[in-house]
Amino acid sequence: MYYFTPVSDMFETVDSIFIYMELAGVKKEDISVEIDETSIEISGVKRRGEGAEEYNFQRMERPFGFFKRTFDMPRTASRDSVSASFNEGLLEIIIPKKTRNNGFGFTSIEIKDKDK
């Protein structure tokens, strides 16, 4: 199956990781965002308008059909409170970063003498 790749930006600040994806003409209910331990996947479908199958296109540059994009997640990403919003064809995903208090960083391990 062919998937097109929407234009996207991914960047981070001190506190969060941001993903912006241009999805002009896509309905919110046709978008899926799934996250696991190592990645976030955005997928969905961009449908043609009603009656489009009757047209004799002279040029067709806008992609239609299924799309999918996967981003690797940094270890600093906190998957517990990810938020997503969709407005005027722009999908925004905000992934907070972990703090030292919620599991990021090193844990000291006590070294004991081995009994003989």
Image: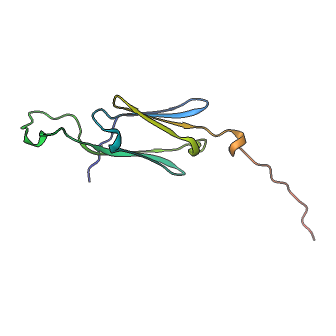
Q: Residue at x 32, y 44 (%)?
A: 30
Q: Position of residue 64 (x, y in %)?
A: 23, 41
Corner quadrant of residue 23:
top left
Q: Position of residue 113 (x, y in %)?
A: 91, 62
Question: How many numbered discs, if any?
Answer: 0
Residue 67 lies left or right of residue 41; in this view the side is: left
Give the colour scheme shown: rainbow
Q: Is residue 68 among what the camera can see?
A: no
Residue 85 lies left or right of residue 22; in this view the side is: right
In this view, the residue in front, 15 or 26, is: 26
Quarter holding the C terminus is: bottom right
Figure check: 10 above or below 112 = above
Residue that sits furthest to the bottom in the current view: 116
Q: Residue at x 18, y 38 (%)?
A: 49
Quarter holding the N terminus is: bottom left
Q: Is residue 42 among what the camera can see?
A: yes
In this view, the residue in front, 116 or 98, is: 98
In this view, the residue in front, 29 or 98, is: 29
Q: Residue at x 50, y 32 (%)?
A: 11
Corner quadrant of residue 29:
top left
Figure check: 17 above or below 72 = above
Residue that sits furthest to the right in the current view: 116
Q: Residue at x 34, y 28 (%)?
A: 88
Q: Position of residue 2 (x, y in %)?
A: 26, 50
Residue 94 lies left or right of residue 22; in this view the side is: right
Q: Position of residue 47 (x, y in %)?
A: 23, 42
